[in-house]
Structure formats: C-alpha cells, structure tokens
Amino acid sequence: MTTRTLIIGALAAAIALAAAFFGFSSFNEDATASSEDAMVVLHRGNLAEPSTLDPQQIDGTWESRIVRDMFEGLLTNAADGSIILGDAKSFTVSDDGLTYTFTLKDGLVWSDGTPLTAYDYEFAYRRMVDPETAAPLAFFLYNIVGARDINGGRVDDLTQLGAHALDDRTLEIQLIRPDPYMDQLLVNQPFFPVPRHKVAEFGDDWPRAVNIVTNGPYILTEWVPNDFVHAVRNPLYRDNANVQIDEIYYYPTEDAAAALRRFRAGEIDLNTDFPEQQIDWLREHMPAETHIDPSTCVGYITLNTQAPPFDDARVRRALSMSIDREMLTNRVLRLGEPPAYSTVTPFAEGYTAARPDWYALSHEERLDRARALLAEAGYNDSNPLRFTYRYREGIKNRRAAIAIVDMWQDIGAQVDLVNTEVAVHYDDLQSGNFQLGDAGWCPFVTKPDELLGLAHSDYAEFNYAQYYNEDYEALYNEALSMPDIASRNALLTQAEAILIRDTPVIPTYYYVNKNLVGPQVQGWVDNPRNTHLSRWLSIDEGLRPEQTSFADRIMGLFN
C-alpha cells in the first residue's frame, strides 16, 4: 500500500467521521437543494469582484453583466445580441439625424412601485455628465448637445444638456452630429435610467442592497464582498411574465482553473472563462459545454508615454515589432484568437485597418529593425532597456505575459513581471502607476472610433498611455463629423496610421469569447458581443449534472 493510498484512506475516514459527528452531508448541500426546489436558481461565474453596482460608476464587463440584469434602457438586447425595444415603446429620428424622440411604454415602474418616467432618464443623463458624479464612461454621451462642456466643467447648468423630458412618457435627445451607431449605444449602461427619488434620499449609497431599486428583471438583495452578489426576480418588471429564473448568484472567478473545478462539481451553471491550458481536455470531455466564438474585444499593451523610457517612440515601436503575434496566438493562447496589428476589431463595419510599415517583414527582419531602433535610443548590451510589465491576474494573462517577455528578451530588454488582481490593475493604469501594462477592451459599439478613442483625450479615463497628438485628434474629430460611415472610416484609417507610428498602445490579439455553459442552461445564444442577459435564460433541472459531494471534491485533489 502506498503512502498516497494511506493518506487518501485517512482523509476519507476523517471526512466520514466529521459528517457523522456534525450531522451534515456535503456541507448540507441536500438541505440547500431542497430549499431551492420551488425556485429556479442560476449560479453564474463572473470573472471579478465588482467595485460598485451603480450603472453610472462601472466600467468593467464583469460589473456590466450584473447591472444589465438589474437595469434596462430605452433599447436592450435580445438573446442573440440584436437590438430590440426596452423601456421605449417606439422612437422617431428627425430627417437631419439630430433629434431622437422616444415614447416610453405604459405602466413602467421601479421595483418599489414608484412610476418610472422620462424624467428619470433626463435626471440620469444629467447625472452622468455632471463632473461631480465622475462617471468613467461619461464620454459616451459627448455627442449629446452640451454634454462635453458640462462634463468638462465649462458649463455648470445641467439643464443645458440636450436630453429633455417633454412629459412623463416622452424623451427627446438632441445630437451634435448624426450618429449611425446611436441604437448600439443606447443598450449600454451609460444610457440606463437611475431612480431620482432614491438618489435624492440616499445619495451615493442608493445602490446598496438595502436602498436600491431597479427597473430591470432582477433586484439586488445581498452582496458579500469577494464571495457573491445575489439578485432576485423583480415582480414589477415590465416583462416579468416571461422571465424564468427566480434567483441569480454571481461569483468572482478570476482563478479560471478553480472556476472549472466548481463548474465540474455542479456549483456554478456557467462561467465566462476557462483555463486555456485545459482546452484539449475540455474539447475531449466537455465539448458541448465549451463555447468558443469570435469576439468584438481586443487585447493590447499600453505604454506610459509620459515617463522615460517610453516617452521615446523608437522604444515603443521596437517593443511592438518584436512581438511575434502569430506565435502568441497559435502556440500560447491556442483558441483561434486572430493576431492583432490594429486596435480596431474585424467586426467594425466597412473599416480598412492601417498597418505598420514593418508588417510585411519576416520576424527576424522585425527583430533586426527593433534592435536598431533601441540602439538609436541609446540602449545596447552595456546599457540594456529595463522596465516593469504589469499584467492582470489569470493563467491566460500570465502565459501571454511570459511569452511576450521572452520575445522582448530577444532584443536585449530586461523585464520584471508584476501580477495584480484585475480591479487593482486597472486602477494602477488609470492612475499612471505603471510603465507597461496589459489591457483589454470590449467595445460598447462595434465602430472603429470607440476603439481608436482609447488614445484620444476625450477618453481620458481609458487613455492609460496619456497619449496626445494634435494631428491624430484633428483627424479623429473630423471623422466624427462625417455623416456617412464610409467617409468617417476613411479619415479614421488615416488617424490610425499616426497611432501605429507613435505606438502608445500595442495591439496583440483579438479575443474569442470563452464560456462554460452547463446543459441545464437553456436559451444561451453565442454572439460576438458576448451579451447573455439572464432574462432570456432558463434552467432544465432534468439536465442539471449531479453535484459532486464534498468528500469527492477532496478526493479529486489527489487525482
């Protein structure tokens, strides 16, 4: 008998004795299951711990998934990600494309029964651009008349914002210029209503579970930090009759390997990630549960252009051209991620991406040119380029970071790696507390100006590189004044050529959506935006895998 067998046998005996002594089985899972028999419960793995659930304060996809289950805008997404009417019964657009007039559905109420009116939308949009709110995504409203000046502190009269309630059921939005993507914008949380009566009563504490009211399918009941967020069905939601899940638990699952174990044990029904190193096993043993499909998101590296040595474009360009993106995607990531040389994803309609002038070179030729650029900048064997590269927590991010650092070592760079939790990582990027850092962006709208805006002064919260180029900004701004997509995109391609030359960001690869979805989860439809509102999902209890017992989970650690 081996030592391992003795250890497992002793563990099994100890678990059985503890269960008998304390009177529980599998941490009382049977009791939990029986208490939930009458309720349909969804357990969602959700990547990271939210920092807030105020729709106007969030900027992470993991927060958005929760908020979009609790709130709804004038327009919303269907199960396949397409755009449908939400709170709006109908809307019209003026001939010049500058005025949108929305008529709200009859009988809309907040979850406490208070009528929801167009004045709640007016209040929300004013609050969104109010500098005191410090909303990180306020720039999404900048095409509304007055929004930029109000948010920038140049106008202190919120009534000057071009979003007005004409009566309880009519909202008018006035734009500076026509926007062919306006419908795509309106489904996102910067355009959600907030309950003015609760904000007036509780101020910034209104989103707490004891205070919050919502207008969407679910309402927050409990939030245990770093454990779960619990939401229950809102009986006053306008389409409650067609909502099938009664309760949702959202769990932070930054450790993708641990989340996979929980998924296999039946503790979570779906998760928005899985460990890439397990892809061969998943494809063999769980092919139906493993969902991989094209994504609108892009992964990139941001460089602090305000601090040496990355205030030198030659250094930035050298680092970009030395990354073998094809090797990164084919041999490290291995899920079919396309290599990225542009921050603009392939889903941007009618856009022709600019390419670096070194794009057609072989990898060895790129390395030679990169070494020459570093030499021009004063870096060589006796004075090597040294810096710290920050990356987000997660096995995939770690593997990518290690591979990229190895590539940088080929041109003589000496790099220290620093790993931080996702929310902390982005706080560091926003505060400028980094030299190089990895990042990702999932666009609210599949249009090139949003992605190129990550290097524009209007996007200050997300222009982590603190990059500014007058010619780039002029071309970008002129592009947004174009009434048709073709003219707009032509100018944006010119702007992107400047961005690639200056290299404040290094696009590396386009994401794929990676989801684990249990067979019991019905109504899931893969889509590029990876939008899966819980209101469209249901649970078939007959297909739910049997939960693994606590004892079996302990045994699994040794297998």
Image (spheres, rainbow, N blue to C red):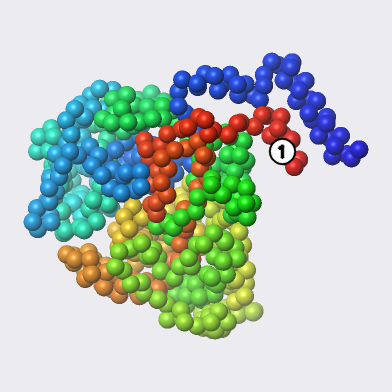
Q: Position of residue 361 (x, y in %)?
A: 50, 83
User: What is the quadrant of residue 348 in the picture?
Assistant: bottom left
Report whether 419 appears left or right of 443.
right
Q: Which quarter of the rendering shows the N terminus? A: top right
Q: Amino acid at mark 1?
A: Gly
Q: In the displayed structure, would residue 97 be above or below residue 486? A: above
User: What is the quadrant of residue 24 in the picture?
Assistant: top right
Q: Position of residue 231 (x, y in %)?
A: 42, 29
Name the residue carrying label 1. Answer: 556
Callout 1: SS: helix
Closer to the camera in the image, 286 or 65: 286
Report whether 198 appears left or right of 519.
left
Q: In the displayed structure, would residue 474 be above or below residue 80? A: below
Closer to the camera in the image, 349 or 147: 349
Q: Position of residue 370 (x, y in %)?
A: 53, 79
Closer to the camera in the image, 407 or 89: 89
Q: Which quarter of the rendering shows the C terminus? A: top right
